[in-house]
Image (cartoon, rainbow, N blue to C red):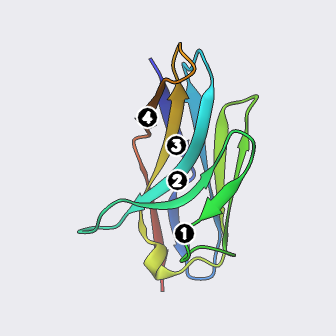
Amino acid sequence: QVRLVESGGGLVQAGGSLRLTCAAAGSDFGINAMGWYRQAPGKQRDLVARITSSGRSSYADSVEGRFTISRDNAKNTVDLQMNSLKPEDTAVYYCHAKIRGLSWYEEYDYWGQGTQVTVSS
């Protein structure tokens, strides 16, 4: 059974930094893209950053230049370094991974349990 376990959330003042880490366990056939999403109260869950297995990354406009996503394929981890945090970055952050199946065309979506990030003004 695949599990994604997040860590690193917390409370920080505006302008501060936090680093989120997500570790994937139980993937027998590898992982395709990994990413981070966030959901603020009363809002939909939105993509924050995404990184492919080859290391190509993409970001939401709202975090471009402030957040950096990285991954370690050997350890099956994905990190999100968040700098210059703003109060509007406050949300529950979820790790996401597309886990490969037995066949080359199979992939399945998995989510972490979420970690709270709160940025005070």
Residue displayed at 27% across by 67% down: 41
Q: How much space separates mark 2 and mark 1, taking CA atoms?
A: 10 Å
Evaluate if marks 2 and 4 touch, with contact meaning CB atoms under 8 Å apart.
no
Circle 3 is placed at which residue position?
6
Of circles 2 and 1, the one toward us is 1
Q: Which residue lies under the disc numbered 4?
A: 110
* Quarter holding residue 13: bottom right
Label 4 crowd (10 A; few <14 / some 14-19 / many >=20):
some
Count of numbered circles on the image? 4
* Mark 1 secondary-structure assignment: loop
The residue singled out by tag 1 in the image is 60
**Residue labelled with disc 2:** 36
Between circles 4 and 3, the one closer to the viewer is 4
Secondary structure found at label 2: strand
SS for callout 4 = strand
- The answer for how far apart the CA atoms under marks 2 and 4 are is 12 Å
Amino acid type indicated by mark 4: Tyr
